[in-house]
Image (spheres, rainbow, N blue to C red):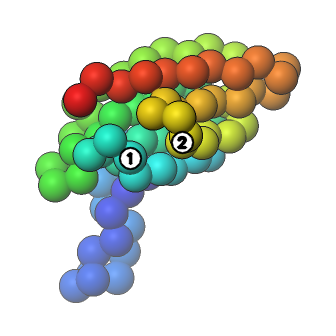
Amino acid sequence: MGRFDVRTHGLTKLVEPHPIGLKIAFGHVWVVSLAAANLDQIDELTNQVVARLPIGGHPIHLAVGFDSLWVLDGDGRILRVQPTR
């Protein structure tokens, strides 16, 4: 995940390679990375990772609902994450 710079028309500040899911929820940006198999909590103002949860497996989808983040992996497992506010 990165930021688009409107002045240079380029992508800057890559956080994780191969992001496969991005959601804005619970006051933060959440990204699941296929390559690193992490769920990252990112501060949208600083673009810094403020928390990282190694989830393992091969994540393929990220969803939000029922006060939780849900990560589906390629083996059919579902991980529920309930962030603290």
Quadrant where the C terminus is found in the figure: top left
Dot 1: element: strand
Q: Quadrant of residue 48?
A: top left
Dot 2: element: strand
Compared with residue 11, is residue 42 higher up or lower down, i.e. above or below?
above
Q: Is residue 45 left or right of residue 13?
A: left
Q: Nearer the viewer, residue 77 or 19?
A: 77
- Seen from this angle, which residue lies furthest right? 75
In three-dimensional space, the C-alpha distance between marks 1 and 2, rounded to whole angstroms, equals 7 Å
- Residue 16 appears in the rendering: no
Residue at x 43%, y 22% (from the top left corner): 82
- Disc 1 crowd, CA 10 A, few/some/many (<14, 14-19, 20+): some
Picture disc at residue 64? 2
Residue at x 34%, y 34% (from the top left corner): 41
Q: Position of residue 61 (x, y in %)?
A: 68, 40
Residue at x 47%, y 50% (from the top left corner): 23
- Disc 2 crowd, CA 10 A, few/some/many (<14, 14-19, 20+): some
Picture disc at residue 25? 1
Q: Position of residue 5 (x, y in %)?
A: 27, 75
Disc 2 residue type (three-letter): Val
Q: Is residue 46 left or right of residue 68?
A: left
Residue at x 22%, y 85% (from the top left corner): 7
Q: Position of residue 62 (x, y in %)?
A: 60, 40
Q: Are marks 1 and 2 in contact (CB under 8 Å)?
A: yes
Disc 1 residue type (three-letter): Ala
Q: Position of residue 43 (x, y in %)?
A: 22, 44
Q: Nearer the viewer, residue 25 or 60?
A: 25
Q: How many numbered circles are shown?
A: 2
- Seen from this angle, which residue lies furthest left? 46
Q: Is residue 42 left or right of residue 66?
A: left
Q: Is residue 61 left or right of residue 21?
A: right
